[in-house]
Amino acid sequence: MTLGVEHFHESTPIVLVIDDCADVHRLLTARLCNEVMELVCETSAEVGLERAHQLEPTLILLDLDMPGIDGFEVLRRLKEEQSTSEIPVIVLSGLQSPNDKVTAFDLGAVDYITKPFDLMELRVRLRSALKMRRLIQMLAQRAQIDGLTGLWNRAHFDDRWTEETKRAARSSSPLSLAIFDLDNFKQVNDTYGHPAGDAVLQGVARLIQKIARQADIACRYGGEEFAVIMPDTTPEQALNLCERIRAALDETDWPGKPNRHITISAGVAGSEGPTTIGRDEWIVQADQNLYRSKSEGRNRASMTKVNGAGPRLAEAS
Ligand SMILES: [Mg+2]
């Protein structure tokens, strides 16, 4: 199962240098070539800002004294914009006055290096800022992981679902949502105790994670409820995946407890392309399908297409 920090994608950090002096670029490119980072250099503040939005670099090295928009203004704009506000900025400047330093820090710079700079010093400060950035990202990500199962938690689901519905609406691409609920889970807790119940939740989470594909977003939705967001997935494909999860759980032997048979019900709502349905209404439809699965005998998955087609059922085998 994907657990905790393994969600974290370790990619080469991208450092964007915005400085009007080409010599600085040449120097940095030559002297930082052994560092594990990709250096992207821009000499204009305007283009630098554009690159920052487009690349979302790991860190920005920013000159203050530039023609046109100066570094302070670049910093201000970076911090105003949601997509760039979290990127750490190290100011690289020939301006030495304490006022400039105070202003830069007030605007949100994480460090201030005066020119001419010592390359050793720049290197260690850069490493330290990159490390801090990584730790902060890991912490933020941990806060979105469910402690018991290692799946994404409800907070992450809420964020991602909003994002994915918007993305699907923009690109008219398919999108599906499945909500799962363990059948008669209260009986497991009542009969075997809560530690056994927790072990079942962990086992089911592992199974969902194993069957779900790389791009699927598997979450613990509530107590014994799970949700899987399936980008670029038609309702039929989603139903198929749910059916595989349902069948795999149906066939699972729980160690030491031969009589324990755990089953799950699922409700799927999906769109094949353009849709005008809102994010919440979509969840309501998945929920309604889940309740239909329950009322028709549990251990089954039901699906509807959110753009209007009638209900389709996948019966338990
Ligand atoms: Mg300059």
Image (cartoon, rainbow, N blue to C red):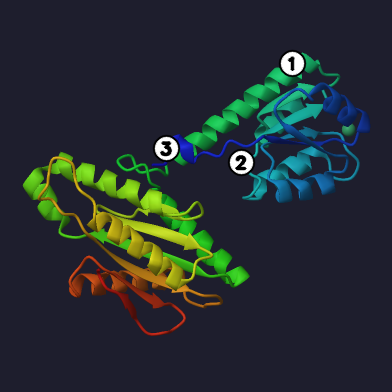
- Examine the image and state in which quarter residue 73 appears: top right
- Ranked by sequence position, the earlier of labels 2 and 3 is 3
Dot 1: element: helix
Mark 2 closeness class: few <14, some 14–19, many ≥20 residues within 10 Å = some
The residue labelled by disc 3 is 4
Question: For the point 65% across and 39% down, which residue is it?
Answer: 87
Say which of marks 3 and 1 sits in front: 3
Q: Position of residue 281 (x, y in %)?
A: 40, 73
Q: Looking at the rendering, in which quadrant would you find the C terminus? A: bottom left
Q: CA distance from mark 3 to mark 1?
A: 34 Å
Q: Position of residue 65 (x, y in %)?
A: 86, 34
Marks 3 & 1, CB-CB < 8 Å contact: no
5 sits to left or right of 273:
left
Instruction: Give the number of the disc on residue 86.
Output: 2
Dot 2: element: loop
The residue labelled by disc 1 is 121
- Residue type indicated by callout 1: Glu
Dot 3: element: helix
Q: CA distance from mark 1 to mark 2?
A: 23 Å
